[in-house]
Amino acid sequence: MAFHDTTRKMGPKRLVEERVFRSSSFRSVGVVDSITFCRKVAQNSALDRALNRLVLLRKHPADAVKKLLPRPARTMVTGILARVRR
């Protein structure tokens, strides 16, 4: 399966984050430009889920930081990521 416009538009971005990256029904998830692709399976393994989350972390590092770190650390890391992206 492939989904387009999943890096900038909030609707497709949220859909793949909630329904693909965090699902037990997809494996081999990847991202190329603004396209997210995956393979649908009856049940993925724990390793597949961990790899899917790793791809999600790499796709949106600033978003992941916001969800995982306490507020003071978030501010610092988000600022560093913004400078690195330039």
Image (tube, helix red, strand yellow):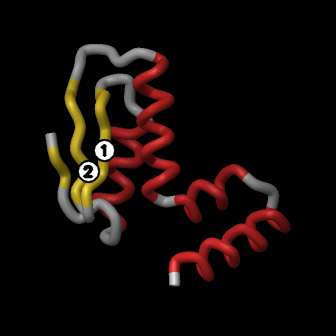
The x, y position of residue 19, in whole percent, is 35, 40
Give whichever of 62, 16 is nearer the camera: 62
Residue drawn at (69%, 75%) of the image: 80
Residue found at the very far right of the displayed protein: 72
Q: Secondary structure at mark 2?
A: strand
Quick one: label 1 or label 2, which is nearer the N terminus? 1
Amino acid under disc 1: Gly
The x, y position of residue 54, in whole percent, is 49, 41
| Structural distance between the alpha carbons of marks 1 and 2 | 6 Å
Say which residue label 2 marks: 36
Disc number for residue 30: 1
Give whichever of 25, 39 is nearer the camera: 39
- Label 2 environment density (alpha carbons within 10 Å; few <14, some 14–19, many ≥20): many
Which quadrant does the N terminus fall into? Answer: top left
Residue drawn at (43%, 45%) of the image: 55
Residue drawn at (59%, 54%) of the image: 64
Amino acid under disc 2: Thr
Placement of 5 over or under 54, stated as above or below? below
Residue drawn at (22%, 57%) of the image: 35
Q: Secondary structure at mark 1?
A: strand
